[in-house]
Image (cartoon, rainbow, N blue to C red):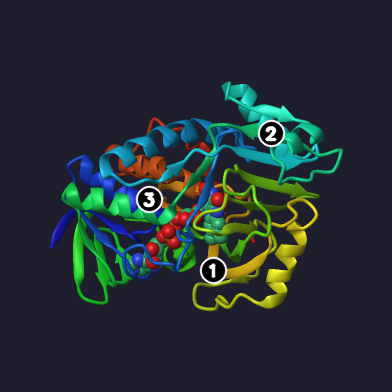
Amino acid sequence: MTYDVIVIGLGGMGSAAAYRLAQRGKRVLGLEKFTAVHAQGSSHGGSRITRQAYFENPAYVPLLLRAHEMWDEIERDSGQRIFHRVGGVLVGAPDSGTITGSRASAEQFGLKHELLGAVQLRERFPTMRPTPDEVGLYEPGAGFVVPEQAVRAHLDLAARAGAELCFEEPVTHWEDGRVTTTRTTYEAEQIVVCPGPWAPELVADLDIPFEIERQVQYYFAPDVEGFRDHPVYIWDREGSQFYGFPEIDGAVKVAFHTGGQICTPETIDRTVHAHEVEAIAAATRPVLPGLAGRFLRGATCMYTNTADEHFVIARHPGHVGVTVACGFSGHGFKFVPVVGEILADLTIDGATRHPIALFDPARLRGGA
Ligand SMILES: Cc1cc2nc3c(=O)[nH]c(=O)nc-3n(C[C@H](O)[C@H](O)[C@H](O)COP(=O)(O)OP(=O)(O)OC[C@H]3O[C@@H](n4cnc5c(N)ncnc54)[C@H](O)[C@@H]3O)c2cc1C
């Protein structure tokens, strides 16, 4: 069977790429190792923060402006509720990279935001107990997206636009123009690889040392009121961050952003241990008392980290008809729709109007 484009991996990025390519009239085949909307990779757990005052680098902001526009479009076209604009607050020392970086992005792009001192922060958000020297950057346009709904919506829209989507059909090998799975071999002019934490296996010849990091999403029934009508937040203390969400279906989710074990999708420990639950509860206790009331459940997830924590999105330097998107380093989900658009641009036009210089794989090749 011959296609215009084969998309390998139908998680966050691959589902969006399949949709945008099919929407632009391409004959698309999507191949996924697991079932649709599974919990084995990086795109599950009920919530993902999205925000635009990006402390990681202002170069991401134009992409986030487009992504927020696109989430609205996808909700409309799919009839799924994906984006909850509950607001977001970043808390940290005024000179922390989290605060200075997000302020710089907000100011450069004229994004709506407010800088709140500790007293104002506590008045506005009574669940929070910042120390007197902590500040908060509040962004009213921030919030969270539901990854399962987002992937589902993209898969539905892709299928509606004519894409053929195959699940439980792992790719065992790909080369220019040809993809082999456990079932058969397919041919296509172009290939798009969206491997998530399977990047070390599926794009080994990029020669990039990806680090796969295990992270746990913890869900608690809080002991206190006030988490239902609540912004998303990231709390930065001495460079270590944890973040969380409002109460959804009786559960608040919190997680650490740093310090996870290095693993592979084969070796990851999927058990959430009591000492880990105690560690996250202890981190939240002084600043969000009552949040970690009763532990309900935990779910592991994987980050695919690059050395500088910036993404890899490019035409594959070693192949003619191959485009890759990986290395999202634990902050990629909010970009899913715009990454789909960029991948369609790169595949069809060979270039994109979006600024993606930061994501060039050449910067990472052969790194130790
Ligand atoms: C705990 C946690 C919290 C996060 N929080 C946030 C957040 O708040 N905000 C944010 O923006 N981002 C967040 N992220 C990051 C974000 O979720 C990821 O960057 C994003 O989901 C990555 O999408 P992906 O498509 O690269 O990977 P995935 O969604 O994992 O997709 C890769 C797909 O490829 C498939 N695949 C692999 N091998 C094969 C094969 N051989 N054949 C066929 N298919 C294959 C996999 O099964 C999978 O479906 C978080 C991640 C985690 C783990």
Check disc 2 and report its element: helix, strand or loop: strand
Mark 1 residue CB less than 8 A from any atom of ligand 1 = yes
Q: Residue at x 58, y 25 (%)?
A: 112
> Is residue 104 toward the left or the right of residue 337 in the image?
right
Kindly identify the amino acid type of the residue bearing the numbered disc 1: Ala
Kindly identify the amino acid type of the residue bearing the numbered disc 2: Leu
Q: Residue at x 27, y 68 (%)?
A: 167
Please identify the residue farthest to the right as the structure is shown.
132
**Residue denoted by label 2:** 137
Please identify the residue farthest to the left as the structure is shown.
1
Q: Residue at x 47, y 35 (%)?
A: 63
Which numbered circle lies on residue 299?
Answer: 1
Which numbered circle lies on residue 150?
Answer: 3
Q: How far apart in space, not on screen, are marks 1 and 3 (Cα)?
A: 19 Å
Mark 3 residue CB less than 8 A from any atom of ligand 1 = no
Answer few, some or many: residues within 10 Å of disc 1's Cα (few below 14, many 20 plus, some between 14 and 19): some
> Is residue 145 toward the left or the right of residue 31 in the image?
right
Kindly identify the amino acid type of the residue bearing the numbered disc 3: Ala
Question: Which of the pair 193/97 is nearer the observer?
Answer: 97
Query: Can the viewer see residue 69?
Result: yes
Query: Can the viewer see residue 327?
Result: no
Vertical comparison of 249 with 338: above or below? below
Q: Residue at x 64, y 61 (%)?
A: 368
